[in-house]
Image: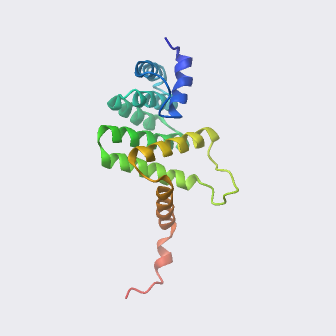
Amino acid sequence: APTFADSDKLGLIVAGGADSGLDPETLRSMGGQLWRYGNSGAQKVRAAGACSLRAGRYEEALERLMRSLELSDREEATQTGYFWLAMVHHHLGNAEESRQWYDKGVEALQRAVPSDPGQPTSKHPYYWLQWNVLFREASDLLGLDPEEELLKAKTRNETAEVPASANEGESKE
């Protein structure tokens, strides 16, 4: 049986791709260990939710992922949860909720992209990598074009940044 330390490491590996090569029972066991021992830490709870998702236990994954959002005190860690939640809701048949979580994730991801392509992101490399892997996976699962979705999010973010006073001088004819 995997140890707690193994579960912690494997939970993070599972987060990196849909085909971890682990059977659902191993994933279920690992997720259970992470949940029992990590219920006070958002990262372990999120990894437990990821294991549940990968094992096809979607209701359980939803509970764990929502709990991880409650526990998280790091914005970049919370944002990786958005794509996990989009995928869980997709599997549960909740198309509207899936799209809402996906859009929230894409907008947060787009805001983190450096305005100058030559500059690095301000996000920790671990989260940046996981965020991008999950973004691509969620896009594929939902049948969306990731580049198109990033452009839409950029437009929404730029529109939201325009102060209301900038439009005051416009004619209302």
Q: Horizontally, is 41 left or right of 60 in the view?
A: right
List x then y, in percent, for residue 82.
Answer: 44, 43
Q: Residue furthest left?
A: 93
Q: Nearer the viewer, residue 14 or 80?
A: 14
Q: Residue at x 52, y 20 (%)?
A: 7
Which quadrant holds residue 25? top left
Quadrant assignment for the C terminus: bottom left
Q: Residue furthest right?
A: 118
Tell me: residue 142, above or below residue 32: below
Q: Residue at x 46, y 61 (%)?
A: 152
Which quadrant holds residue 138? top left
Q: Residue at x 51, y 65 (%)?
A: 158
Q: Nearer the viewer, residue 118 or 74?
A: 118
Q: Horizontally, is 97 left or right of 134 in the view?
A: left
List x then y, in percent, for residue 37.
Answer: 48, 20
Q: Horizontally, is 25 left or right of 126 in the view?
A: left
